[in-house]
Amino acid sequence: MSKATALRDLADSMVEQTGAVDEKQLRPLIDEIGELKTQYRAVLGGVVRSNAP
């Protein structure tokens, strides 16, 4: 399972259980995905362009 899928599943589960998302629980996974995106861009250099902030 990808990190993004795990994040979505966790958020969906939180909403089902409590009606809200707890960012404190999601933040570590969000940060990890952000770091992976940064590493991916660094490896590919100018070949990949991203509109993501």
Image: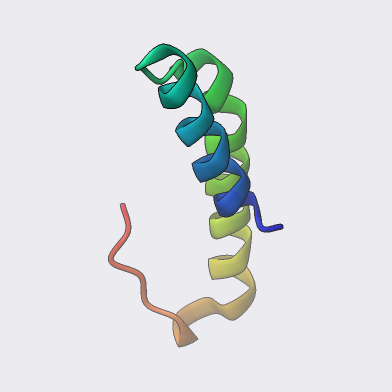
Count up the numbered dots. Answer: 0
Point 60% across, 67% down: residue: 40
Q: Nearer the viewer, residue 43 or 8?
A: 8
Point 53% across, 25% down: residue: 27
Identity of the residue furthest to the bottom in this view: 47
Above or below, 13 against 42 in this view is above
Identity of the residue furthest to the front in this view: 16
Q: Is residue 33 left or right of residue 50?
A: right
Residue 2 occupies quadrant: bottom right
Q: Nearer the viewer, residue 13 or 33?
A: 13
Image quadrant occupied by the N terminus: bottom right
Above or below, 31 against 41 in this view is above
Q: Is residue 2 left or right of residue 30?
A: right
Q: Is residue 9 left or right of residue 22?
A: right
Residue 9 locus on image (x, y percent): 55, 41
The way the protein has been coloured in the rendering is rainbow
Residue 21 locus on image (x, y percent): 41, 20
Above or below, 20 against 37 in this view is above
Identity of the residue furthest to the right in this view: 1
Point 28% across, 66% down: residue: 51
Point 44% across, 25% down: residue: 16
Above or below, 22 against 28 in this view is above
Residue 25 locus on image (x, y percent): 57, 18
